[in-house]
Structures are given as C-alpha cells and as structure tokens.
Amino acid sequence: MSAYEWLIGTRYLRSTHRRGFVSFVALMSVCGLMLGVATLIVVLSVMNGFERELRNRILAVTSHATMVGLDGTLADWRAVQAAARHQPGVQAAVPYIESQAMLAHGSAMAGAKVRGVLPEEERSATGLAQHLVSGRLEDLSAGSYGIILGSALAHELRAGVGDSVVLIAPEGTATPTGVVPRMRRFRVLGLFSSGMYEFDRGLALTNMADAARLFHVAGGVTGLRLAFSDPLAAPTLVRQVARRLSEQLGIQGFYVTDWTQDHANFFRSIEITKSMLFVILLMLVAVAAFNIVATLVMIVKEKQTDIAILRTLGAAPRNVLLTFAVQGVLIGLAGTLAGAALGTLLADNLETLVAGLERLLHTQFLDARVYYMSDLPAYVELSDVLRVCAVALALCVLATIYPAWRAARTAPAQALRHE
C-alpha cells in the first residue's frame, strides 16, 4: 500500500462538499459498531462474573469432594481419614454424618439437610465458620443437642438463637402401637449466612455425636469431606485418592463426588447460555458492521468522478480497491476499539451502576432465591474481549469487499461522460 492510497482513503472519510453527510453516516456506523461490541462484552462479562461468583461462593461453603462407602457408610473412618490426609494435594479430610430431616418450630415446618460435624475439624474443610452471623461452631458440643441453622431456614421456621426446634428423622422407631417418628428437641445456638440461598435454606449443622444418636449411625460416619489445595482439580484428585486408599486399606471402593458434579447442571446451563448469547448478540455486531457497506457504497457513488480521474492518471484497480478498503477497515477498527473500551468500562463498574439504578427505581433486579445472589457481578476476561474484537473486525473486513470491488470496476469513460 502506497502513501496516496492511505491519504485519499482517510480524506474521503472527512467532511465533503455535501455538508458532511457521508462523514455523518460513517460516524453512525462507528457508533453502531461500538454499541454492538460493548453490549456483547458486557453480557459475556456478566455471565463470567456470575459463574465466577457462584463458584467462589460454593467453594467457600462446601467441601471440594466427598468419599462415601459403597453401603452408604464408612465403618473404619479413622483409618481412612488418616490415610487420606497423607495423599498429595489433600489439605483436609473431615468426617460427617448427613441425612434429610424435618424441622419444626411452633406451626412452622421445613425440610433440610442436617449435617453432623466435628466442630474442631470443620473449619479446615469449609468456610462456613467464617459466615456465622451469631454463635460459634465450638458451641456444638456432644450431648448438648445444639444446632446452627442457615439464615433463610431460620427465617422460614421463624426461629432465632435460643429457640428450640424439633428435628424429625426420616426413619421411625417400631413400638407396640406402630412406627413412631424419631424426634428430638434441639436448641438453636447460632445462624450462618453464606450468601448462597441453596445452603442458607437447606442446611443445618449439629455435633456429629448428636447426629449419630438421632439417625442411629453406630460407630461409623456417612463419609469424608475433602479439601484440596487446587479446588479446580478436585474431579481428578478425588478419584486418584479413592483408588489409592482402596489399594492401601483393602477397601472394595468408594462413591466419590465433587463440587463440579453437585452443581454440574447449573454450570453447564451457564456455558450454554453464554454461547447462545454470544451468537444472538453477534447479530447486533453484524448489523452494525454491514452498515459499512451502505456507507462505502455512498462514498463510491459520490466519488465516481474522483475514481475516474485517478484511473486516468495511472491508478490500477488494485490501488482503488485498497483506497476504499482503508476506509472500511478504519471504520471497523474505530468502532471495535471504542466498543471494547466502553464495554470494559461498563463491565468494571456494572455493580455500582446497577446498585444506583435499584436505589433510583426502588426495586431489586435479582432475587437470591432464584439466582443464588442478589448482586450483579461482572468479570472481564481478556479472551472474550479478543474474541469479540476479532469477530467484529472480520465482519468489517468482509463488509468492505463489495464496495471496494465496485469502486475498482469503475470505468473512467462512463464516469466522465457527463462531466
């Protein structure tokens, strides 16, 4: 590309003798492309932020993986726990007893998971201890029959710290009068609020010894909950640990699950939604990009006399084509870069903007009971920005092909016939 092609191409984008109409249309093309690229980046950033925030909150309140015996219990769990703690990548291995139960307080009733834990070890496996709004894990002493409720569960039961709730186990006790449900009165010693409605509504903690007596788990536990140094490697590590322990201890095997399996459908739906939104919103970018076609066609039609003069002065069709390709690429580059900057700026300040809009409209856009969180996080990933910019630029380059090709085919004699 020689200097005059660049000079003429940039000159045609500036104001012309027709009161700058062509320049105005070019500016609108840049604005349309900018808004399309910015919208796509903001939406993808919101999906990234939603997934990232959800993953962090899940990992903050739940174990990375669990190991359960094939019959649903672990009898010699102390030996398994000691061996698991020495496996590479394992930071903690804590026992637990867990079962579904019904909780009642007055006329209010709610179903939830009741998890028996060892308070002195629970802190090493999960971060629930950091989310207690009242009480302490250490208050769950054996034989005290104390319980710590999730904030949403306590709200549904209309129970607070110091109140008593009746816990009803799913298995009954056979008596001469029939099967009677096993019930035990527990005292609420604390509340936790993890920010995840799934846990705040569906989980209650008690001492493991009290849970064993209530659910008739004699001498064993439901399983072990593991914490790894790299939570993202939990699917691979938990299977490696289970195989090694089976070989070392002569155990037939374990049922293993990890945090990605427990929430697999949710994370898969996020990925599918993100892909679909990318395709759908890419249509906006395509519409804005192909506005360049109309802009360049207008410039070509207006500049037919100039093109003819250039051809008579010795410019080849290739030189004319490059002249108008410069204009389309510059429009696309300006719109794409401006859109990337605007989208990144909006995504970085989205939580503040949404919070201000909620205060202004006196409403809440996200219900934590549906979306697991009440704020709208956004996280800009460089790979998404580069992908959006690359696709937008590719569409702009495609949009310049026809107008530039039409300009290159301009016949000088026909263009100057009526001049």
Image: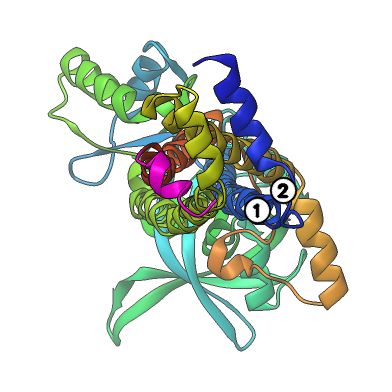
Which amino acid, by three-letter code, is at mark 1? Val
Q: Nearer the viewer, residue 17 or 174?
A: 17
Q: Is residue 221 above or below residue 216?
A: above
Q: Name the residue carrying label 2.
A: 16
Q: What's the magenta region?
A: 409-419
Lower position in the chain sequence, tag 1 or tag 2: 2
Q: Main secondary structure of the magenta part?
A: loop
Point out residue 69 in the picture as x, y percentages from the top left corner: 24, 38
Q: Are marks 1 and 2 in contact (CB under 8 Å)?
A: yes
The reply, left or right, for residue 114 in relation to residue 363 is left
The reply, left or right, for residue 245 in relation to residue 343 is left
Please tell me which residue is depicted at 39% across the width and 58% down the height of the picture. Answer: 215
* Element marked by disc 1: helix
Q: Name the residue carrying label 1.
A: 22
Which amino acid, by three-letter code, is at mark 2? Thr
Q: Nearer the viewer, residue 80 or 274?
A: 274
Q: Is residue 221 visible?
A: no
Q: Is residue 242 above or below residue 73?
A: above
